[in-house]
Image (cartoon, helix red, strand yellow):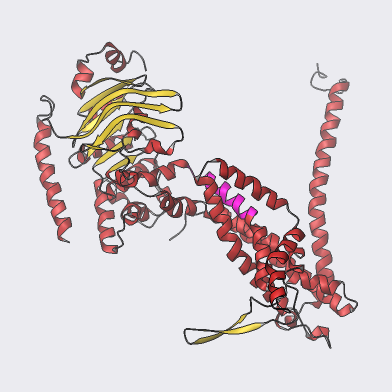
Amino acid sequence: MSPTTNQAQAKQASLSKNNQMSNNEEKTVEPATAVKMAAHDVDFYYGAFHALKKVNITVPEKQVTALIGPSGCGKSTFLRTLNRMNDLIDGTKVVGKISLDNEDIYDRKVDVVYLRKRVGMVFQKPNPFPMSIYDNIAYGPRIHGLKNRQQLNEIVERTLEGAALWNEVKDKLKASAFALSGGQQQRLCIARVLAVNPEVILMDEPCSALDPNSTFRIEQLMEDLRKEYTIVIVTHNMQQAARVSQQTGFFMLGELKELAATQQIFTNPTHKETEDYVSGRFG
Amino acid sequence: MANTLSASHDVRWQWRQTTNRIMLSLCSLGALLAVLVLGLVLVFLISRGFSSLNLNFFTKLPNHMDERAGGMSQSITGTLVLLGLASAIGLPLGILGGIYQIETRGRFGNIVRFFTDVLNGIPSIVIGIFVYAVAVAPVALKNPGTGYSAWAGGLALGIMMVPTVMRTTEEMLRLVPFSMREASLGLGATRWRTMWSVVLPAARGGIITGVMLALARIAGETAPLLFTILGNEYLATHVVHAGGLAITLPRSDAPIDALPLRIYNYATAVDENQQHLAWAGAVVLITLILVFSILARFATRGKVLEEK
């Protein structure tokens, strides 16, 4: 009982701290935080196709980093290298170094299963399991060995609240997850990731299959989530990047053209290509 | 003007139209004949066999003094035991093999698929002889008078189940969207855990259908049983003590009976009464197979989502 209370208090504390921060965040640049993940000279190959070229990026802790760029520019590919999701595809190769808390995630000693527990992922299309809402959330904690019914109940409630879904589903936790709307399913998928208590959440165009209203809710949610989690989001929607992120990276043809504070990318980019893209001249 | 939409003057068009009609009629005829054959078999079976069906048929052993007072209870039990044993052997092999083919996209998977396809085409009598050679004859050599057993029959039928079960398992697992797998792996699940907790349950309906069809197929097999179970007009049982309870179970290491084998034996007998019993047995057998087929349809309709 007490650990959860502590967590709740900690959450409360961080909530208030960040709220003060967000008041003047429009003007000033965010205070420099610790680097959570970093990529150093990362090249990526699908067979012979050179999909990422010498990508260098740092992901600050408890901030939202947005990755934008035209289709096929490698931003999703890069996102998927951050929790080694690309390992599932045959014939892929990563060169360079990607670290999580200064630990090389492509080191031979790294257990991918444990890495993915720490770096969770929300996909483009909501992909709930064919189970009840409750079991969808409980799946993660269960695979990591939690059996206690009461603790599971707590996690389900806490994460569904965290994903702003609790009020809509609390009376039908035993119903199939497929009965939910697309937006609700996506929030369920976010709650499902929260339930394994990751440190980083990767989001691969999480709103592209959703209507504007659901998109709005998920963006609000991200604003809350970044108080506790580091978020990297790939998006095609530049307004979305501008709204939710503190740092933005612009990808083009497999290269990271520019990485800067979001405000700077959208108002005063260094590169011509970035400016052309964010002003809608192409892409 | 009134003639422009009429094609009566166009010989080529009329020819196309005629071909069209002929081919469609042939298709209908083909479909009709297929259904008709099944219908005739059913009508014929029921008209010949139904009159010999009574309660005794299900509860009594054969009675050669008065066939009407006897039945085929040992064959019905035997067939069920054999189906159980075959499932115990064929299901794990088939399902695990199907999972293997999905999980490893390597060359060996293709080889496995090819060989199971070949296995599917092997005549059932050959499988019967094979099991006789490896499981019946060696035992009989060591202890004369033994060898034929329910296990041997179950093994033969189990081998016959493997290709069907493996194929359907593989196909049904392939239908589960990759995104579901990704979601589970993305939460830090292992591949096996993902398969066991997410992919397999999602494909469960289809796999059950495959299993039912495989059971329906082997339930009627006679040839592999000729060499393996011998047949038995009694039911060999033994008492198993479990948790203070004494349960009478059929012996799996003794010759056992099966419906198709008994039908074969009685249908070729001189005694007319036995021939009647064979007809009745055929009705029971086909009903059993029909039940499996219907269950197979239900399994896919039910899908996975209503659980809990």
Residue at image position (38%, 45%) is B185
Residue at image position (84%, 65%) is B44
Q: Position of residue B188 (x, y in %)?
A: 34, 47
Residue at image position (77%, 68%) is B226
Q: Nearer the viewer, residue A58 or B46?
A: A58
Quadrant in the rendering for residue B4 = top right
In which quadrant will I find the C terminus of chain B? bottom left
In which quadrant will I find the N terminus of chain B? top right
- Does residue A206 appear to the left or right of A229 in the view shown? right
Q: Nearer the viewer, residue A40 or B170?
A: A40
Whether residue B285 is in magenta: the answer is: no
Q: Is residue B205 visible?
A: no
Q: Nearer the viewer, residue B67 or A178?
A: B67
The stretch in magenta equals B163-177
Quadrant in the rendering for residue B95 = bottom right
Looking at the image, residue A50 lies above or below residue B250: above
Name the magenta segment's main secondary structure: helix
Residue at image position (28%, 50%) is A195
- Does residue A92 appear to the left or right of B24 in the view shown? left
Whether residue B166 is in magenta: the answer is: yes
Q: Position of residue B102 (x, y in %)?
A: 52, 46
Looking at the image, residue A199 lies above or below residue A238: below
Q: Residue furthest front?
A: B142
Quadrant in the rendering for residue A213 = top left
Q: Position of residue A189 (x, y in %)?
A: 34, 44
Q: Position of residue A249 (x, y in %)?
A: 26, 24
